[in-house]
Image (cartoon, coloured by chain):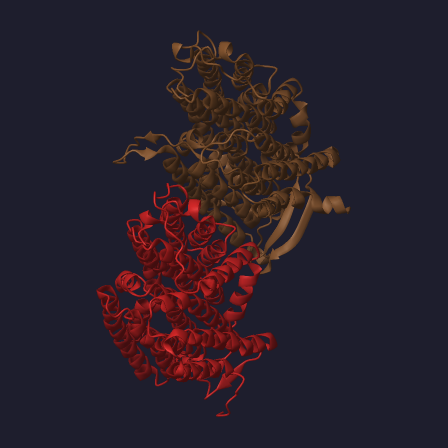
Chain colours: A red, B brown
Amino acid sequence: MTRIDWLAIAPELVVAGTLLVVLAVDLFLPRERKYYVAALAVLGTTLAMVPVILMAVAGDSYSMFDGSYVVDQFALVLKGVFLVAGYLVLLISVSYVESDRFYQGEYYLLLLSSLLGSMVLTSGRDLVVLFVALELTTGPLFLLAGWRKGDLRSNEASLKFFIIGVLSTGLMLYGMSLLFGLTGELSFAGIREAIASAGLASEPVLGLAVLLILVGFGFKVSAVPFHFWAPDTYQGSPPPVTAYLSVSSKLAGFVAMLVVIYLALPAVTEFWGPALWLMAAASMTVANLSALRQTHLIRLLAYSSVAQAGFMLVPFAGAAIADDGLAEGLGATVIYLVIYAVMNLGAFAVVIAGGRRIGSYEISEWRGLGSYAPRQGVMLAVFFLSLAGLPPLAGWFAKFVMFRAILISTGPAGVWLAVIAAVNAVVAFYYYARVVKSAWFDKAPDVIPEDTEAGPTGPLNLAVGVSLVVVLVVGAFPAIATFFGDAAAALVP
Amino acid sequence: MELFEIWALSLIVFLPLAGALVALAIPKEREEAVKLWALGVSGVTLILAVIVAARFDFGAAGRFQFEVDLPWIGAIGANYHIGVDGISLPLLVLSALVVVLCVIYSWKHWDEPHNPRGFLVLMLILATGMNGTFVALDLVLFFIFFELVLLPMYFMIGIWGDRTMRKIPGFKKEVETRLYAAIKFFIFTLFGSAFMLLGFLALYFKSGSGGLDPTFDIPELIGRGFLFEGTFAWLVFGAMFLGFAVKVPMWPFHTWLPDAHTAAPTVGSVLLAAILLKLGSYAFIRISIPILPETAREWAPFIAVLSVIGIIYGSLACLAQTDVKRLIAFSSVGHMGFVMLGIATLTEVGINAAIIGMVAHGLITGLLFFLAGSMHHRYHTREMSRLGGNLKLMPVLGGILGFTAMASLGLPGLAGFWGEFMALLGSYQPLPGLSTDFFRTAMVIGAIGTVLTAGYMLWMLQKVNLGEPSSEWAGKKFHDVDRYEMIAWVPLIVLIVAVGVYPKLVLGVTTDAVVGLVETAFSSVLGG
């Protein structure tokens, strides 16, 4: 069936159109009005939400290009998440990019390209679409990470990210080619059937293929032991780019992992189950212990994002162990992704806002923030404690469904992972609380940092406000989040 | 169903939270308005709690009343299920009362850095958490409220807490007491409650075996107790035990308590002692024992041992203290030991003892912390070696301190007596199947504990209240009990006497519920 359903690809078309308009308009804008392109980009992402919502409400499902491109509830939910995340990152970027006199047009162009890639990714149902979309997502980020050209740290960030990105892509591609060679199929459904009908489940080469693909994804989601690029890249990149890296880029890795594992490889749990169990346990433990020693806020958030990736991997392990765990695991990961995206962006927005005023990301320099800027102090506490998973902030529910998804299996492997996760949740609280402690319990410095006037702050405040509302409302009424989880879980065949 | 029946409990729980949000809208400078608002909100909450108590059907105290059961998170089967029975009602009223008294007390007593609005907002959020825990009948809801109390208390200790520098073993530099205490309090409790949550989830999944829908509903889970057995039940009990025992706190999980109490501002200490500690022991009675009765019997001797160690250890530790507030904090370890000993007997007498012990401890230790705070406010020290002759300097305050200390050491006729006495009585004849010799030994050791309690309380009184004031205070004029203190303390004093003289005030409410609980849980051993 080669008929193209225009409504189904309308969100991608809108983003692609915005991207081109941004490129063209930027050429004709005088330097002092370059930030108009930001408004255009924000407008574009908002518009792209319309078809997504329309299709989600109608409950439609579209399949195009011989099933390679599918727009179902799973895809719509994640397109929505990517759009909201992109929207928030754009808002966070405006004042930063404006105040540093960046190449604004190109900045938004690249950000939108990456967003486009991740939106295509959610619909990709064969290896080729998946691969191209994943590369479109990460490719622009190599450039964005090095956007502060004169800054050595930024150069380092970009270079490290690039080398690791290429390496992981190579490994992943090798795994994919093995998978294709074994099964002769590119589509996930085809691979699944081929494994079942040809009895490949015990084929060692299949195991190798799965492992190589997982290593590739491990780099993308920055899970231990493939995480070591993350702290340096996060610290060196411009903070709004870091926010995007820690949310959208990580989400893209997870989405790819979700579709490959749950659509193509549900039958061979013995290949990916133990590997992901180990990755989850290692990510949580190593990242949390490293985070305890960080003094730089962005580095702290980098390790926190590695640890959170570990928590997100836990439901995969549960899905592998439990008899009927696939739908549960998928739903739990998606709920975690949705909540994590919003609270982490909120945290970044507050950190960037505070960083502009304080002029430093050293935690000790943030002392007494609550006494001279109580509103910012409260926001900081809300988002960091939500990341820690404390009720009644939204983070608790992400942790809750994660525990639920692993405990659905009654075996010792599940219980042990749950215990490891529980201990890690407590350890993680300590370093999140350190930031809160510095802002609220420590005495303010003698010279209170002045509020800087450079660049518009409205968009940044809007980003904080939106995230705050979501964190509070979802925390009190988690049924909203389960709605997303249920819709996405329909993916499981 | 009447409108009041449906809304009463929800209002008691969420009115303080709504009040806190509104208080944020009042400008920070208008302190009087904030205080009046907080008083009004907590006052209305108390009135509602009293009306609930008045309309409570005491003939059916074993049944949940004012019940509301609405869907909340459909996908995971968690409901908004709340209700009170004879076990939770006294604690709910106590919690509502103590919050009002704390608001009144803090009218003129503020610790640095002042900021009444922030403090009162935290106190109101805390009230929502405490009241909610006592009425929650769904494990997820219970978990949320149980955790909700952590944040406000963390900020109370961390911001308004004690600023003196202290050398803490394991730290290179001296740290401020409040910083160390706040994070310690949080990490300990969070560690426990993370495992508690795992236990809850395990119960949930297990309750779904045999073709039933899995559930978080506490009454429903009690009915499905037969599903939980063997190693599974043992582990789940252990996981929940960690969560509850840290909160109580039982020896050896108690070490956060002296630090938190010493560092907390006066009102924080009062709330911590009077209500927060009860959340743990209440959870044993509400969740652990009725849902896992068979496992509770296996764990009972272990709990009894820890309780008795707690009693003796707490008393001995008191004798080694020089700081009056720290002494009261350690006395809590001992008193909660009696409460847990009562629970460990698994008998009607023992569990009744635990509840009346909780109420009494809430009244008495709450008042003791008020007194300690007021003394510190005047002397600017809590070192007992520098205090002395308090009775001469401030006769009224000294008198109340003497009275409360007597109540605390379990003087017959005052509230503290019944909890200790009945806990020991319960240990004489524990639940059939539990070793009588074992529990009688526990009883004897516990009895020695009461003597030690009397010892350190009298020792404290002698050091602080009696004798001649030290020359340090010569010529200084001390303001005796002021109006706000009086208003805050008199209700506690009256209740201490009332419960002491007429324990039926509490036992009359609880007995039916406790009897029902024990008979349902242990029908196999009691019937045979």
How many numbered marks are there?
A: 0
Residue at the extreme right of the image, as rendered: B2
User: Which of the two residues, A197 or B512, is positioned nearer the viewer here?
Assistant: B512
User: Which of the two residues, B280 or B385, is positioned nearer the viewer here?
Assistant: B385
Residue name at image x 32 percent, y 73 percent: A141
Residue at the extreme top of the image, as rendered: B468
Does A290 sit left or right of A190 as displayed? Answer: left
> B263 above or below B397?
below
Q: Residue B348, image x and y in percent? A: 61, 29
> A377 above or below B328?
below
Q: Quadrant of residue B505?
A: top right
Residue A269: in sight, yes or no? no
Q: Residue B423, image x and y in percent? A: 55, 23
Q: In which quadrant will I find the C terminus of chain B?
A: top right
Q: Residue A165, image x and y in percent? A: 27, 72
> B300 above or below B470?
below
Residue B172: in sight, yes or no? yes
Does A195 sit left or right of A152 as displayed? Answer: right
Does A27 sit left or right of A330 as displayed? Answer: left
> A486 above or below A420?
below
User: Which of the two residues, A296 or B359, is positioned nearer the viewer here?
Assistant: A296
Q: Residue B46, image x and y in percent? A: 66, 35
Q: Quadrant of residue B74?
A: bottom right
